[in-house]
Image (cartoon, grey):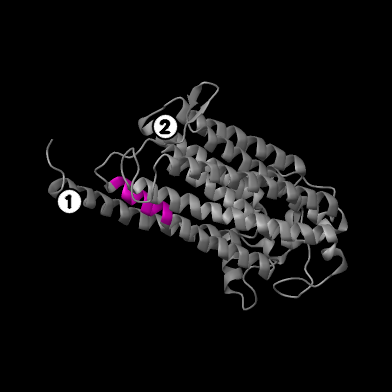
Amino acid sequence: MAHAVNHSAPAEPASADVHAHGQQPSIKLYLVVWGWLFVLSTFSYLVDYLQIQGYLRWGLILLFMFLKAGLIIAVFMHMAWERLSLIYAVLLPPVVVLVFLGILLIEANYTLLTRMTFFVTAP
Amino acid sequence: MAGPELTGAPLPESRLTRWRSIVSDWAADQRTFKHVSWGKSMMWIFLLSDTFIFSCFLLSYMTVRMSTTVPWPNPSEVFALHLFGQNIPLILIAIMTFVLITSSGTMAMAVNFAYRRNRRKTAILMLVTALLGAAFVGMQAYEWTKLIEEGVRPWKNPWGAPQFGSTFFMVTGFHGTHVTFGVIFLLIVARKVWRGDFDTGRRGFFTSRSGNYEIVEITGLYWHFVDLVWVLIFAFFYLW
């Protein structure tokens, strides 16, 4: 994600102050990303509007969500221009959340099983 | 990544491979995040902790939604609005999403103009961002009012699983609080930019140090994070 944006960032004819803070991406890049976020949000909305169901729905929701999140982090939050030590310090720890997600998936299924077994009476 | 073409000055680390640059940064007996100010790295660390908070909210939402034996209310219908003589699903949420994304765009441009020391454009763009944020909170207040009038409570609702109300108020309420604090933060910094505090070196709040335009970028990081969280909430709570 960070690497792809890097190449498309045009160099800016910068003042001395801009140089002091590293190269700033151009306004045009922000407008392009903004446009893409609009398009991706529209697609997400259409997933619901067109009543797409099942795995296709969940897959599309996740796809558009990750694309939007990636654009926001990489360009708007300038992550693409940070040093790798900061990038990994911020982006790696949330991956551990996936372990918690796995634990809670098991737990939720188990809770559902016990509820179905003991509490739900047949109609 | 941190090559000479991006940071302006050639760095000795640019000769190392990517992984070796990480190892040398983290093994250094000086600062780990080179060329990153304490304010910016602390904001990143705060945002990381906030990520875990919102992860916990969304994971607990997932757990109660998966484990309930009562059908979950259909968000597409719950959040529909009656407009132009027909029910449009999720339309208010879609508008809120576009408003927040637009505010993120204006914020990104404010950061850019701040580093060009364009006080006027920076302050105006930050005020526009704050205004859009306030509009978002206003629409959320409307949404809450509508749902409360329809009988949604943290412990029950007319359509199905009672956990719907508790997770809805908790998740969107916490996010709305973040947006509100962001608007206040934006207004404070925009006022300082407008007044020229960062050009004259005037000493300011929290630290009594004279700040610089980096505070605009740090404010922007927070604001973009709020937008990022909304992307997740929109996907998992409203669309799923």
* Number of callouts: 2
Q: Main secondary structure of the magenta part?
A: helix
Measured as percent of width and height from the top left, residue B107 is found at: 70, 49
Name the chain under label 1: A
Q: Which mark is residue B204?
A: none
**Apparent side of residue B45 relative to residue A112 in the rendered image (left or right):** right
Q: Which residue is mark 2?
A: B77
**Apparent side of residue B124 relative to residue B167 in the rendered image (left or right):** right
Q: Is residue B74 magenta?
A: no
Measured as percent of width and height from the top left, residue A108 is found at: 27, 51
Q: Is residue B65 magenta?
A: yes
Q: Quadrant of residue A123?
A: top left
Residue range (magenta): B57-66
Residue at figure coordinates x 67%, y 47% from the top left: A6
**Apparent side of residue B5 relative to residue A91 in the rendered image (left or right):** right
Q: Residues within 10 Å of mark 2 (few under 14, many from 20)?
A: few
Residue type at mark 2?
Glu
Most foreground residue, A86 or B203: B203
Measured as percent of width and height from the top left, residue B210 is found at: 79, 72
Image quarter (top left, top right, bottom left or bottom right) of the C terminus of chain B: top left
Residue type at mark 1?
Thr
Most foreground residue, B139 or B45: B139
Q: Which residue is mark 1?
A: A114
- Distance, label 2 to label 1, CA atoms, is 30 Å
Q: Nearer the viewer, mark 2 or mark 1?
A: 2
Measured as percent of width and height from the top left, residue B123 is found at: 79, 53
Query: CB atoms at circles 2 and 1 under 8 Å apart?
Result: no
Label 1 secondary element = helix
